[in-house]
Image: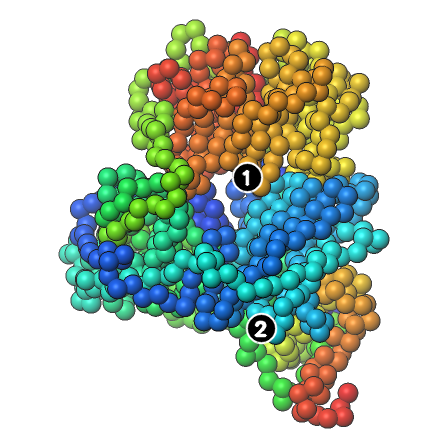
Amino acid sequence: MDDCLAVHRLKKGDMGGLEILIARYQAKAVRTAFLITHDQSLAEDVVQETFIRIYHRICFYDDMRPFEPYLLRSVVHTALNVMEKTAHWTSLDEEIEPDAVANLLQRASATEDMVEFAQLKEEIYSALGKLSPRQRQVIVQRYYLEMSEKEMAEELSVAPGTVKWLLNGARQRLRMLMGMEGNKQ
Amino acid sequence: MKPMTPHQILDEIAQEHTPQHIHLSNGILSQIRKDQQKTMNTRRTAIGFLALAALLVVLLNNPTVVRAIQRLLGYVPGVGMVDQSAALRMLESPVEMKRGDTVVKVMQAVLDAEHTLIDIQVENLPAPSSPQTAQSDSMCHQYPLLRLKDGTTLRGKTSTADFWLSGYRRSMAFPAIPLSEDSAVLVVPCLEGSYPEADKPAWEIPLKFTAAPPDMTVFPLIDLPTPTAAPTATPTATPAQQTTAQQSARIPAADELSLTLSKYIQTDDGVILAGGMQTAATDFHISAVDSIAIHLHDAAGQDIPLEEDYSLIDSLSDEMLGITAPIIVRSAGSFAPGKATLTVDSAWVDVPVSGVAFDFDPGENPQPNQTWQVNRVVEIAGYTIHFTTAQMAPNGSGLTFQFEAPSTVGGLVLMDTDHKILGGGGGPGSTGFTYADAFPQGVLHLTVTGLSVNISGGWQTTVDLPELANPTAPAALPAACMTQAAWRSALQSSNSAIPAGLGGTLVFSEPLDPDFYYWVLIAKLDGSEPKKIKMGDSPTLSPDSSRIIYSDQTGLQLYDLASGAQTTLAGTTRSDRGALWSPDGTQIAFTRGPASGLIGAPGPHSIILSNPDGANQRALVENSDANIAQAWLPDGENLVYTVKGPAGSAVSVINILTRKVTPLFNIQYVNAGVSVSPDGKQVTYEEMLPGDRYAIYVSNLDGSNKRLVVDSHPIVATVPQWSPDGRWLIVSVHDTSVSENHAILTLIELDTCQIIPLLNLNGYVSTWNP
């Protein structure tokens, strides 16, 4: 059964349609959420909440659209909301920026050395953990969901150039705003 | 190694830190069913309720007599809980903005010390200007914002929403607006479900706030006194539930749990009760109470329908400390004043298990996706668990075990305690885990560490219900023909043969295994001569039973039963649904959705007339409403249709020659289907009863002489159709104890209330011809 028909069934009130969609996408959705929450059980909560939200709004879902990107983008939004509600997520004394993670990803994707790859992967995981959830969102949208900067700009309701700024400078700006590193911009 | 893309790298990182076997379905569906009260007798239903369990009766004094403590929290109908620690403010007057037929209304706003609560209603959603617009990846899913004078933008959370195709209503909770601000602008970037276009700016609606009048209705949240009996702290498990000395899994006795009502709100037309299940024990956890296990009986012994209201949980969570399985219910319908009893039949508890283990040998070289027959039976506290199969994860990092267990076992936790585990879990029928490191070599020693079980308790507490201030509250319902008990009795009855003389041809649709695509089917009433026609739905059979028109992804399809020839009706698309043959078979009426061509897309819906081959299409009803064609009257000159709206469905009849519309009656269910009796004098339709219970009524054409035919909650019956002789209805019954995915076609004789389940026929009937 394709996603379109599963959504159609769901729109008719048939919960079997939702079960199919959950079975099909829950693993990837949890992985997407985990990249932002860095907490497995929180990631599962996020995915649960996202599916429930989709269920309640399914009558407005355009079933000509592919379901997977719609779901995963919704997961990203929910994960971010949850993280911003819970706070206490980042320490400002780390020198990690989204672009550093992007650089690590580029290096890891270029290497053919297994040992170096494993090390880089560890570094990426660790570095992700030091980003704010919003910065993780940007990384996940750009590199995991493979959204274009234009799509990201639309999702984030910002000008396309702002996405680059978000990828590179958000943290520096935050530090400056908090008076922690004056002229560093 | 082959280089990986950034996506693959991130995916691998995420996979390493999340379980390979994730089973969220049960939790999600359970939560939705709780939210919606759309319970269809889930597997978790404790059908065999055992009233033998110890009964804890917590007697409460009359809250209207005891010294009620009015807290700062209060309840505003339609808004929710508000904090009255500072003076409340509200919208000076309702505001609306129009563009063409489309209206955005701000119905209500209440400002308290913590929130700005705003209720928005959108009517007459615009249709997309072109299918191209609709098919772009641009449907609006943005929520409104609030903009203050200094340009600050507030983002809100949404709690509830209702949709009816041509419009919606949404409640938003924004952060508090400073007292110094008496105005704000509600910015609606786009209308949900519509297609924003570049030349259409956001809706900006100025709001003006003022002090709430002293007589504004705010119902106090009343503390109920501490229950007179507390749960026992000392375990008193029954001997039958103990395991052997080596095995330990203590199933709590019912008297270790208690039902507490801690808060109470009395409104004009009912009461809201807040409380839940709690325990003093620390060696188990009460995880949930199924909504169908909660009952309120008034002083006259009448079963009062209840609606769970989880929108209040956040507001009341601080008020219900110690409660792990909260219950917030509101009464629906009238009740007798006086001492009422709230009963919880059963609750789900999670208990730790130790000493229950078995060895599993995956062999020397286990492979991803490999399956093993396990066939291992363990007894845990009197529950027999049969592990049937095991399967290795696709990436080889863990195992999933399938098991069979009594329906009162909701799940169990199985671990390999000899090796580091990354995570695990499961639901009814399966459990699994993922190793943190490489899959271990050799025989694995697996241990059951936890069990989720449903225990019966019959916990009760009493509360004095007040006189209702609103005399218009709905009266008690008469008994229906088909109740849950009558359905169960019919299922077990040996007298389920179709009466002599009752027959005919059914055309229906049904999602078929294994892919659950909808198929158009035809069969005799007794199930004979079944035939799969085509993939599609909403089929109807011509009056001479020679042709079927149904809907599929490309449009309306005309199928000739004799030749098997199929043609697409010219000029139709997938947005055209529900074709209805006129009584003489010379024309059809159908519903046309917005130009997007999407099924169920929001926006105006028209009713179209045409020849059966699709020629001569002309609009019969065309406006900004969501109009749905329902049934022809036998004269062939009048068509019954419904208009979806915020209050449900308005039923009308339109004369196809004069276009004169005659309103008939209203149904409080937005998705109601209506069928006209063969003599044209009566209708049968779906309705939603208080407590969100699905029901089926029969009434005269004008809605008078309304008779409740089906009220079988939590069994759901839908889509009623008349027999050719007008004496019977055929309905689709969802009973998950019989089938998880298929609706059972069922006959109900209106005169005698005889119920005949047709266990060999599943689906949704749209035509029953002689």
Q: Is residue B735 above or below residue B681?
A: below
Q: Amino acid at mark 2?
A: Leu
Q: Is residue A65 above or below residue A135?
A: above
Give the crowd class for mark 1: few <14, some 14-19, many >=20 residues within 10 Å: few
Say which residue appears at 52% left-offset and 19% top-offset.
Answer: B701
Residue B9 coordinates in the image, percent (x, y) = 67, 68
The residue carrying mark 1 is B647
| Mark 2 or mark 1, earlier in chain | 2
Q: Is residue A63 left or right of residue A85?
A: right
Q: Nearer the viewer, residue B89 or B52?
A: B89
Q: Secondary structure at mark 1?
A: loop
Type of colouring: rainbow
Image quadrant where residue B233 sits: bottom left
Say which residue appears at 29% left-offset and 49% top-offset.
Answer: B465
Q: Amino acid at mark 1?
A: Ala
Give the CA distance from mark 2 to mark 1: 35 Å
In the current view of this chain or complex, which residue is farthest to the right? B199
The residue carrying mark 2 is B179
